[in-house]
Amino acid sequence: MASRARGLAGRRIGGWLVLVCLCALLAPAALAQAVESRPEVRVIIDVSGSMRTNDPERLSASALELLVSLLPEGTTAGVWTFGETVANPLPRGEVDGDWRADARQLRPRLAGVQPYTDIESAVRRAAAPEADGWRHLVLLTDGVIDLSPSRGAKPEVDDASRRRLLEELAPGLADEGVVVHAIAFSDQADMALVESLSRTTGGLPALVASPESLLGAFLDIVERIFPADSIPLENGQFRIEPGIESFSALLFHEPGAEPLVLVGPDGSEYRAATPPPGGRWQVEPRFDLLRVPEPSPGEWRVEGEITDESRIGVASALALRTGKLPATAFLGFPLSVEAWLARNGLPFDGELEELALRAELIADGGEVQSATTLARDGGRFRGVLPPTSLPGTASLVISAEAEGFVRQRVQAINLLAPLVARHEPESQRVVVAARHPELGHANTRPWAELAGDRLAVEPLGERRWTIALPELDDSISRPLLLGAEVELEGETHALRLPRLVLFAESATVLDLAAADGELSSERFHQDLTTGRSADEASDGTVERLVATLNELVAAGIQRWRTSWLPHLAALAARPLAWAVAAGLLLVALLLLMLRGRRRQRHRAHREDPHV
């Protein structure tokens, strides 16, 4: 499992070339296993002029090639483009060799040429055609709504379109079974739009600023749309059990590494030039990619230097299945998990010796944030992952192990704080808004603490609150501690939210010992007014004293920077100043030496006292 965790963190390496190769090899193998449904995939690509600036490496064009390469045969898919107007250059159709060829021919038409960006119309048009199952929209954009002035005064017309997209269209799509995975190609993108659109519809948001991050984003999306099984790869070894129909191996290595050798259970050696019977093997500078149909059961081994990011996907009649998993989970709240085994798509009612299922939430760095063992409940296994406290993208890994049987399922999850705070210096306030769809004034009571003092929190709108700030020196950064008492589904949660740094760009910083982005969750037995246990609660005197001392130290540092340091710098730039300083230092050393000798002579001539 540790190797798998490291592999999850390393999926971001390798660049978009890996996914191009997946077209011929990995996708047909990993996705050969029957999926629970046949969702429809609709790709929406921004071709506005702003993409020339925000997507200089033409990642959006590469992304289309990558995604259509990963789509399994028989999937229904189509391509839309948009700028000021919306077009459908590749209508919906069944994915096969001809469809893929037509999709790749669109690349010259994806250059940013249109003057404006109408994201709302593009999403509305692409989502409109009915489908038999779920519709997954993959939106590739710089995430900036920019409508023509002919449609109204700016920026009012842009703001109105943004509100309609997020407040009206997105909830309606979610009700219709339409999922939007929004990917932004610039750090200048409106990430709040990308995140909100994806979260509301149950999709995955991503910021892709390099070919390396493109790999991870698209693998996450494909794994969510078309989940498949994998098995552990540890120390270059993996076990193929009887009944596995095929396996695919993605083996990462350093450039210039010695050619890899695949050794079968009977000792047979296979190489790129001589793959296993019916198999395909492709060699690239940083990885090898191979597919083996009808593999012999037993222990397989890879000889050669491969990294921990390498992985093995399998297709078989007996597979691991999971219940619906959210694309977004909120910090401080538990996450329910359900899984079971299925044979040929039907629930497996047989018995496997010592069968055990487990769920782990693993951060991008490979650290296990939360874990639990799933308990058998009839023909299914259920469990609850404890709350986690680190925001960002994580992978939920569900594993099933029995005698001679191992399967894993991986789903990407976006972890968000349930409340988000924004500092508005011009209004001398902080505004807190609910991200969690079920939080509002009726069940949520936020609190704020500055330098040990509690601040008043007042309702603002339906799901927002305002915190009035005292007069503050904007040259000094300081943390505002935030938390909330939340009642949800019959339980009370005390949340410590990520701290908000006021005037974060200031040179002087106060009391920043704790790491940003942390969130802790406690049960109701704690003192919710402070976020500490009852016997640790105090009247804030110590906190105010510490804050006062911090301010005095900061003021001294600021005076050193503004008064003494410039004078010393100016003197240091003058050669004469260096000479004078050296002379003074030499005189001081001589005086110290003379004084030391005088003391030694005094001790040498001192007489002992008479008794």
Image: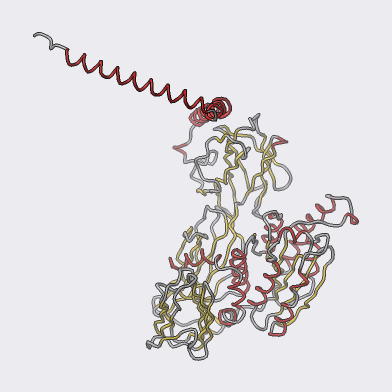
Q: Is residue 123 visible?
A: no
Residue that protrudes farthest toward the right in the picture: 150
Near-viewer residue (344 or 156)? 156
Q: Give the quarter of the image for residue 183.
A: bottom right
Near-viewer residue (298 or 323)? 298
Q: Position of residue 213 (x, y in %)?
A: 60, 63
State the residue at coordinates (52%, 41%): 531
Which quarter of the figure is the C terminus placed in? top left
Looking at the image, residue 500 lies above or below residue 609:
below
Q: Is residue 351 visible?
A: yes
Q: Position of residue 125 (x, y in %)?
A: 81, 69
Which quarter of the figure is the N terminus placed in? bottom left
Near-viewer residue (457 or 11)? 11
Left or right of 449, for residue 372: left
Q: Position of residue 128 (x, y in %)?
A: 79, 71
Count of picture labels: 0
Q: Position of residue 211 (x, y in %)?
A: 62, 65
Q: How is the image coloured?
A: secondary structure
Residue that protrudes farthest toward the bottom in the picture: 277
Looking at the image, residue 288 lies above or below residue 142:
below
State the residue at coordinates (42%, 21%): 584
Q: Give the quarter of the image for residue 308.
A: bottom left
Looking at the image, residue 223 lies above or below residue 545:
below
Left or right of 581, for residue 442: right
State the residue at coordinates (47%, 25%): 579
Residue that protrudes farthest toward the top in the picture: 610
